[in-house]
Amino acid sequence: MPAQRACSACGRFELRPHLRVAGEMGPEGLIPTTDRFGTALADIARCRGCGHMQLDPMPGEALLARAYAEAASDAYIEEEAGERATAAAALRRIEAHLARPGAILDLGCWVGFLLAEARERGWRALGVEPSEFASTYARERLGLDVITGDTQTAALPEAAFDAVALGDVIEHLTNPGEALERIHSLLAPGGVVWLTLPDAGSLVARLMGRRWWSVIPTHVQYFTRASIATALQRHGFALLELGTAPKAFTVEYYLGRIGGYSPAVAKGLTRAARATGQAGRIWAPDFHDRMGVVARAIDKEA
């Protein structure tokens, strides 16, 4: 019998089977725009101690590293206006907890829209991205300083950043505690971490169960508000802000995601949106199932 795995949030050995969702990553690999809703790389277990959910067994690091290095998709590039709007909203929330823009590090920055917005707001911006496709786009098309590499092992200076962003990343990590500890070491005194992630304890998630749109092959962790707060506290952070963080995309993009449930309905709604001139409108509906979190390293107070 394999050894029981500890909860990624609280560390207890109290994981129990929760949702049967094991499947394959699909022909497109681990891209951020998958619509393979209701499928993960293993079944989901839930911690009886803190309510956190995670895959059990956890996929191997080598498999995930290879898949993320090979990930490529133009979909987010085509949604640049909405992505930049989402990034600007995130930066405003980060800046509310700092005296002024300084040095920001975006771990898992994809094509770099948050970094581009940060640069325009006066930040000194650096990113790390495992995808060769995405990191090359960030450097060559946006002129950004982005390292192609693993977010945990890329060579980075310690105590050098006023803010570290982890946007839609922590749910992909097999060892999120290790990532939080590294972020702690990278932050300068008074610095903050910004995280966005799905809220597996939200009403939408609980009602939809295994068919929730965040149950996808790229996700290995399913945090609730309580479990992300627990994880941050365990690894030396004080929670400053925890709220919702809706993402802005075109109406057509959102309607296209319905294809993960019903391709015919998605096509019909998309045609209607185009016919009425609404397809290109930027839309940020708040389903209250995506969190935005700001926390400060408690032993690095300015």
Image: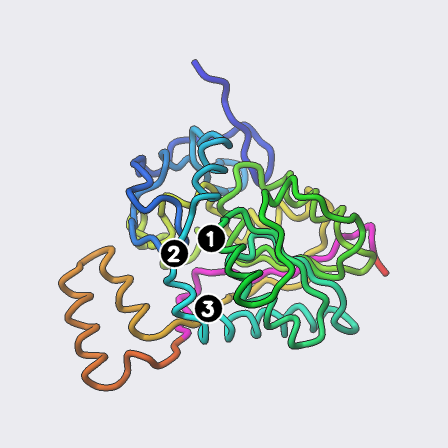
Q: Which residue is mark 1?
A: 133
| Rendered residue at 66%/45% (across/down) | 180
Q: Amino acid at mark 3?
A: Pro
The mark closer to the camera, 2 or 3, is 2
Q: Is residue 191 above or below residue 89?
A: above
Q: Out of 117 and 11, give the one closest to the viewer.
A: 117
Decide which of tag 1 and tag 2 comes sooner along the chain.
Answer: 2
Q: Which SS class for mark 1?
A: helix
Q: Residue at 49% across / 45% down in the picture?
A: 172
Query: To which residue does mark 2 refer?
Result: 73
Quarter occupied by the C terminus:
bottom right
The residues bearing labels 3 and 1 have C-alpha atoms spaced at a distance of 26 Å
Three-letter residue code for mark 2: Ser
* The residue stretch that appears in magenta: 284-300
Residue shown at 39% from the left, 71% from the top:
249
In this figure, which residue is indicated by the disc labeled 3? 246
